């Protein structure tokens, strides 16, 4: 009888710990005047991002001259960006419109799962796109073989499925933690660091899983992208035509700006071995890669492209 007493006491202690049923997202700002202005700004950015990416997907699907590996990846990226902003923007806008946003525990975990899956997919997609440009510029004679449809489909599927797999592992670890209160997240969506800060159990293993996965996905894809662009730069420098060099460098420079901004913000937040306490900085950096880059990517990658511009003009002419 007596050996069971410690177990009973432990069970009673666990039973007295009230599990959090919902989280409260404070959002970007709690000041009413600022919230109204930010709501208009972010709603405009959200609608613009959806419009840009919808247009790109339509142009790629409806014009046969855009049925190439580069545009196949760009179509995947545009589809991802639309999902990406639609995961984080609703709670951001709701917080700006009504104030602190109440999200059920299950809804918070679903948002976290979707966000992690999409950000991991974007990392690997950006690396695949960089590799595609490397083959096109550095190994043009082998391009039809190395980037045949089966390879492109395999790279895209591995990006999406890899993101889902990583997200299942990370979300399961975070959802298994105990949250006994408080339940206030100083953020505009359910992200990894704010949730770890609220856990009332030991999070060392979860932090380790999060850190290792971030290193593998973020640093791994970044190294592939950077190696591709370095090889492209060396090839471009050897081109005899100054005009060709200028064109290639201007294109790669704009790509590198987007890749650099995205990876810099993501690495700072996710590839660190400890929880982030400076949540205001966390929110600012999160805005960069959840709002700014999805809006800029279509402009940088597609709408400045001559073939896309030509397809857009023909579409407007037919209408």
Image (cartoon, rainbow, N blue to C red):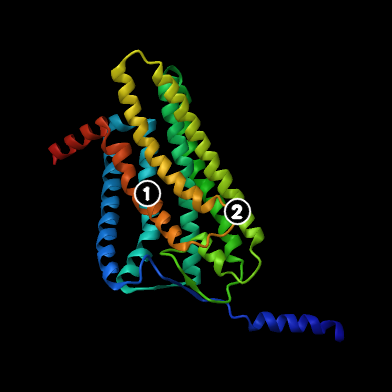
The x and y percentages for residue 77 are 39, 43
Q: Nearer the viewer, residue 169 or 216?
A: 216
* Pick the front one: 68 or 299: 299
Q: Residue 301 carries which label?
A: none
309 shown above or below 40: above
Q: Which residue does the numbered mark 1 point to in the structure image?
A: 81
Give me the residue at 28% from left, 29% from top: 65
Q: Quadrant of the C terminus?
A: top left
Q: Which of marks 2 and 1 is nearer the N terminus?
A: 1
For this rendering, which residue is in front, 312 or 36?
36
- For residue 233, side relative to residue 12 (left or right): left
Density class for disc 1 (Cα within 10 Å; few <14, some 14-19, many ≥20) is many
Left or right position of 302 against 126: left
Q: In this view, does 61 lie to the left or right of 278?
A: left
Q: Mark 2 points at which residue?
A: 273
Q: Is residue 7 visible?
A: yes
Answer yes or no: is residue 135 visible.
no
Q: Is residue 199 above or below residue 242?
A: below
């Amino acid at each position: 009888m007596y050996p069971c007493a410690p177990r009973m006491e432990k069970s009673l202690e666990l039973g007295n710990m009230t599990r959090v049923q919902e989280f409260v997202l404070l959002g970007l700002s709690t000041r009413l005047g600022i919230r109204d202005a930010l709501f208009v700004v972010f709603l405009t950015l959200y609608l613009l991002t959806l419009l840009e990416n919808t247009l790109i997907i339509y142009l790629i699907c409806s014009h046969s001259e855009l049925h190439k590996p580069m545009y196949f990846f760009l179509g995947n990226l545009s589809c991802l960006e639309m999902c990406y902003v639609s995961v984080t923007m609703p709670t951001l806008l709701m917080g700006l419109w009504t104030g602190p946003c109440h999200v059920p525990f299950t809804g918070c975990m679903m948002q976290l799962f979707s966000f992690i899956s999409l950000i991991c997919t974007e990392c690997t997609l950006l690396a695949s796109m960089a590799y595609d440009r490397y083959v096109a510029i550095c190994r043009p004679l082998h391009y039809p073989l190395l980037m045949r449809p089966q390879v492109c489909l395999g790279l895209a599927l591995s990006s999406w499925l890899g993101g889902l797999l990583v997200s299942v592992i990370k979300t399961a670890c975070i959802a298994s933690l105990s949250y006994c209160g408080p339940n206030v997240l100083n953020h505009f969506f359910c992200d990894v660091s704010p949730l770890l800060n609220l856990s009332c159990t030991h999070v060392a293993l979860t932090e380790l899983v999060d850190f290792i996965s971030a290193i593998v996905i973020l640093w791994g894809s970044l190294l592939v992208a950077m190696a591709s662009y370095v090889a492209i730069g060396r090839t471009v420098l050897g081109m005899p035509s100054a005009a060709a060099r200028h064109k290639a460098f201007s294109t790669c420079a704009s790509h590198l700006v987007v890749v650099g901004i995205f990876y810099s913000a993501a690495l700072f937040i996710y590839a660190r071995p400890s929880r982030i306490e400076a949540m205001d900085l966390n929110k600012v950096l999160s805005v960069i890669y959840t709002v700014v880059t999805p809006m800029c990517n279509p402009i940088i990658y597609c709408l400045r492209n001559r073939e896309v511009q030509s397809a857009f003009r023909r579409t407007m002419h037919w209408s």
